[in-house]
Image (cartoon, rainbow, N blue to C red):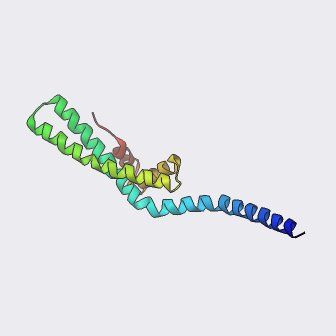
Amino acid sequence: MRSVSRRSSFVIGVVAGLALAYIGLPLWKIGVMQVAQVEFGTLTFDCDNAMRSHLLAKQKLVGTPSKENSDSLKSAEIGLLDCQDYDLMRKRLIRWGLTDNELSEMSLLAIEAKGQDLRDVIKTHEIRY
């Protein structure tokens, strides 16, 4: 009789643990997203700006080769270190359990928070050739 009660207690414990995990996972992810939102948003914008500056500097050098344009490209390449910080935080958030979709949602929330209207959102992602 005693082994039956231990077995049923074990089963009840496992079921309760699974139920708590099922309920707790979304709450955990929401908490991680809330805590990291501001820093992740800043890093998203910094990396986006660094990539845009790098592309423009590269195009300027191709169109008009000069020492000044070469130096501008080198400076823009150093600016890409912002993307390394963004990538490291992204990987850290993945280790904390966030998915690519949740990270994309965080990026969109950052854009919406900084963008006053659609023109600001377009300017953020626009690359001029």
> In this view, which residue lies farthest toward the right?
1
Q: Is residue 8 left or right of residue 118?
A: right
Q: Which of the image's four quarters has the N terminus?
A: bottom right
> In this view, which residue lies farthest toward the bottom?
2
> In this view, which residue lies farthest toward the top?
63
Q: Is residue 54 left or right of residue 112?
A: left
Q: Is residue 90 left or right of residue 74?
A: right
Which of 28 and 50 lies nearest the eye of the viewer?
28
Q: Position of residue 18 (x, y in %)?
A: 70, 59
Q: Which residue is located at x 43 percent, y 51 percent?
A: 90
Q: Which of the image's four quarters has the C terminus?
A: top left
Q: Position of residue 20 (x, y in %)?
A: 68, 63
Q: Quadrant of residue 4?
A: bottom right
Q: Position of residue 24 (x, y in %)?
A: 63, 62
Task: Name above or below for residue 21 compared with residue 104.
Answer: below
Q: Position of residue 73 (x, y in %)?
A: 19, 39
Task: Name above or below for residue 45 compared with residue 125.
Answer: below
